Image: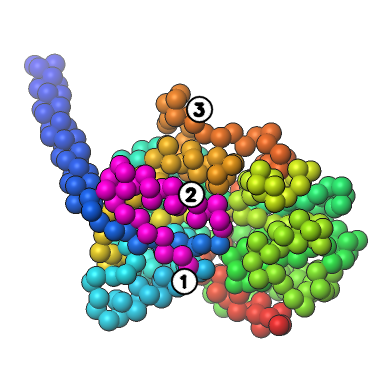
Amino acid sequence: MNARLTRRRLLLGSAILVPMAAAGQSAWSRVEQAARGQTVYFNAWAGSERVNAYLQWAAGELQRQHDVKLVHVKITDTAEAVRRVRAEKAAGRTDGSVDMVWINGENFLAMKREALLFGPFAETLPSYQYVDTAGKPTTRIDFSEPVDGLEAPWGMAQYTFFADPGRAGTLPTSVAELLDWARRHPGRFTYPRPPQFLGTTFLKQVLVELTADRQSLARPATTEAIAAVTPALWRYLDALHPHLWRQGKQFPASPAAARQMLADGELFIGTAFNPNEAANQIVAKALPAMVVSYQHSAGTIGNTHFLAIPFNARAKQGAQVAINFLLSPAAQARKADIAVWGDPTVLAPGKLSADQRQTFDAAAGVPGAVLKPAPTLPEPHGSWVDPLEREWSRRYGVS
């Protein structure tokens, strides 16, 4: 009797699962069908020629494969797109001008809290099955804020230093050693001017390394917490700045400007948020082949960058199809290729077929690649960014 009952339940379960799976498949098919002929306005940072070229390739593939037109709306700061969507919501606009946005951190936090995002949608995408949610926990946590399916992971990042050892000598492996190094090599290091993201990340790297109670950084910033943990950061920068390029009176406006200063020999150590940045630049012959990349031995800040859809996007189906394509093994492999972009994938190799794994470019051993990968340190909660940038500007924001 029990055996017959068990068998009946299994059969009933199978009967239920088949229609559910079919319904799920047809739901995605309906999204794809509705997306055909749509134009997706993708607001994305345009400060890199190789990123722009990759998006141009992706646009061609989306047009060919899905009849979706992807238009790269080139912006210098994601906050521009956030402000536009916020203004459209205030005006009651349901036909927004932003269909898709490259986002993370404080911008995601603002859009999530203000209900400016469409979704949850990310984990319903067919390509999401390949995402490494176990090995890369930041694919579901953005600056200590749960993603909740409101954005889809696109690429991985980790704060990285690069240098010509012949000029730089022994490479510093902590912010304490970096200060000592800067004293011995005055004018040979600097960081981009905050709020440029790489400059702000340098502030956070120093803060994380100097903070014993890092759990306080994972929580929303409060007046009390800021007063307790940031004095060490400002003391460190007060000591470091006199030994920076131009004595810390001026800062490069962009990572590209700082990278060119290293290529010209004006700086000896540079910074990046892509561990493959130097390797990519060596392939492009923009940096000499002897440049190496390294990370501080106790770890450096890392995160995931994401793709999101505003609540009032006109081409929500087209945006979902575009994001699903950008998450696909083929598109992720091309993005990870050192010669194309070198942006580390969010996918789990173990979830890919043998053929799919072979399409990925292995960065290990490539000139300029990270010598010894260090642990990834979590980002402070996104609410820390604004007070850090404001106080930095008050203290050091000289022209």
Up/down of 18 relative to 227, above or below: above
Up/down of 171 relative to 200, above or below: above
The residue that disc 1 covers is: 79
The residue that disc 2 covers is: 54
Q: What stretch is highlighted in magenta?
A: 48-75
Q: Number of callouts in the render?
A: 3
Image depth: mark 2 or mark 1 in front:
2
Q: Distance between the residues labelled 2 and 3?
A: 20 Å
- Residue 46 screen position, x and y as percent: 51, 62
For residue 123, side relative to residue 82 (left or right): left
Residue 272 found in image quarter: bottom right
Image depth: mark 1 or mark 3 in front:
3
Q: What element carries label 3?
A: helix
- Residue 140 screen position, x and y as percent: 43, 50
Query: Counting residues from the N terminus, which is met first, the one under dot 2 or under dot 1?
Result: 2
Which amino acid, by three-letter code, is at mark 2? Tyr
